[in-house]
Image (spheres, rainbow, N blue to C red):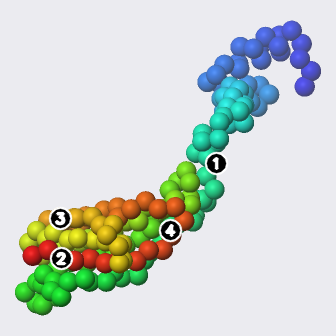
Amino acid sequence: MALNRTGARRLLLETGPNRRSVLGGSRSSHLIRAAWPMALLGVIVAAFAPEPVRAQLVNPVTPYQSRLTIQNGGVNAALTVHRNPFGKPCLDIEAASRAHVINPDVYDNVVSIENRCSLTIRVKICYFNTDSCINVEVMGGQRKDAILGVRPHMQYFKYSFQEKF
């Protein structure tokens, strides 16, 4: 399509940000042309950023890979436990290792305690055969998550628990 003087004037008048141009452009093409400098700035910042910042920008753990590792059941160090009227234990205790986002070789060792009774129960949770312990108080009918420890390269751990009476 050859443009003469009136065709060029018509092209300029009809190509505003909200109108389609004579040549078939749209508002989205204007937005794309305006957005590329910001994308280029983001690439430059990422290239020259210090190492900790780059670790946050490029996560080695894929978004489809779980950061949790479910653990085996703990060892009950006490002889007695709180029970509901039907004779079942009140506490349901589960544990998992959660990898950190920035450094996936460092793990939070998380213990989750669910109290299925109406009593408030206090529990002492330890790494198995150690004195590294935490005390947790769980209200009746609630769940509480507690971090037993933060350890490098310790994806799997063993724990013991003891209910306080």
Q: Is residue 39 above or below residue 157?
A: above
The first of marks 3 and 2 along the sequence is: 3
Residue designated by label 1: 58
> What's the CA distance linking mark 3 and mark 1?
39 Å
Labels 3, 4: front one: 4
Residue at left 92%, top 21%? 2
Q: Relative to the observer, which residue lies in front, 44 or 125? A: 125
Helix, strand or loop for disc 2: strand
Residue at left 26%, top 76%? 161
- Marks 3,2: beta carbons within 8 A: no
The first of marks 3 and 1 along the sequence is: 1
Left or right of 156, for residue 91:
left
Q: Relative to the observer, which residue lies in front, 127 or 130? A: 130
Label 3 is placed on what type of residue?
Glu
Label 1 is placed on what type of residue?
Val
Residue 26: image tag: none
Quarter of the C terminus within the rendering: bottom left
Residue designated by label 4: 154
Quarter of the N terminus within the rendering: top right
